[in-house]
Amino acid sequence: MENNHIKKPSFIYALLMLGSAVIIVATGILVFEAPIQILMFISMVALIPFMKGLGYKYKQIKKAMISSMSKALHPGIILLSVGILIGAMIISGTVPTLIYYGIKSISPQFFLVTALVFCSLVSLAIGSSWGTLGTAGIAMMAIGMSLGVPPAITAGAVISGAYFGDKMSPLSDTTNLAPTVTGGTLFTHIKHMLWTTVPAYVISALIFTFIGFQYGGVVDAESVSALTAYLSDTFHLGLVPLIPIVVLITLLVRKWPPIPSIFIASVVGALVAILYQHFGISNTLRVLYSGYKAESGIEVVDSLLQRGGLTSMLELIALFLFALGLGGLLAETGVLERLIASFADKIQHTGSLILVTIIVSYSTLAIGGSIYFSSVMRGTLMKPIFERLNLRPENLSRVIEDASTQGGALIPWTGSGIFTATTLGVPTGAYIPFCFLALITPLVSLFYGITGLSMTRYEES
């Protein structure tokens, strides 16, 4: 009965609602350099008067807000688990071992392309960009710094590899989510992504190879010596410290759920830290809670190993809550549907459809702050248009992954953007120009949309 008094927003009203949220976030970041969490919270509260104007009662607004925020519970637990895992992987010697032997074995000229391929393989195996960034990614950042490669470029290679695996692995939650929201099937979706991802990956690998030659002769011998000496003096290196990451990969490959897999790997890491690295139980538990603290006086050590722990993820969880709350209010009022409906009938060609879908992808990422929110919203909003043009679900699910999955790390206030920048220690704005895979793949997708190549239709068997 209460819904009888609720009005649908007009185009201007919807534009005002969305514009208010965007202006609050943009002004707060650009003018006041405010934390994105408080800006998302203010934006969420600012939408309440607009919803009251549409006839919503406060308890309906609260219900929509809480219902959307509740979706942050599962990824929030995963985040806390990943924070604990990073701490465990450092104190157990897993990350230090990867760094030490990586420095000893990787050729400086081919470091960037090696980082790309290595992170791709790890991410394909575990199906998680965040897990890859927190283990192999941290190791590659340390190796790159010791070889004289600018951190932003190394981060670009690491991110490209990590999100390649996240996008293409059947173990990845985003890879399973995309076909689910579009009505497709998992392996048809993965096969269809090869059309855009493989060319973009090859081009990215060539670019990183070319850039790598510029840093082939620049090795900071003093920094390398100080880093390797610290690692060998502080940790027992070798095969035993690699047990936690082997356990993690094994469990995820065997399709164990992420949370118990990460938890078990963290416990194994803690046991290795206590029994093999001879860290005390109290110290190990502190690291799992608040992260590893290095006070070596060596810049490369202190900047790269001081991370991890459960508390390192609390700000990110706050962002998830407020971003999903904001997105939930916009979804409840139908703001995005109203804006898209204003031009949906004008889309008559696959080229314009792919372009609009990519734009909607980045817009929903920026509004909701979450790859999951963007994927669900974009799949829901764009699916009828794809069906009207007789395009099969894998076309839409492919664009979702080409833009949303990889684009999450490119927007500073998304969960992926904050996690990536925090974990790798590089600002989002610094690494964006070097995330070649994320920048090139949507262009390849757009090319197929314009030409019609690889765009499967319902009449095709």
Image (cartoon, helix red, strand yellow):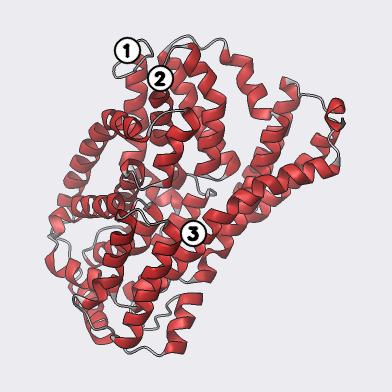
Secondary structure category for the residue under label 1: loop
Q: Is residue 243 above or below residue 232?
A: above
Q: Label 3 vs label 1: CA separation?
A: 40 Å
Mark positioned earlier in the residue sequence (3 or 1): 3
Quadrant into which the C terminus falls: top left
Q: Residue at x 24, y 65 (%)?
A: 143
Q: Residue at x 36, y 10 (%)?
A: 459
Label drawn at residue 460: 1
Side of 161 where 64 appears, left or right: right
Label 3 neighbourhood size at 10 Å, few (<14), some (14-19), many (20+)? some
Side of 385 where 40 appears, left or right: right
Residue 65 sits in which quadrant?
top right
Q: Report if the CB atoms under discs 1 and 2 are less than 8 Å apart.
A: yes
Residue type for callout 3 = Ile
The one of 322 and 242 positioned closer to us in this rendering:
242
Label drawn at residue 78: 3
Q: Report if the CB atoms under discs 3 and 1 are less than 8 Å apart.
A: no
Label drawn at residue 392: 2
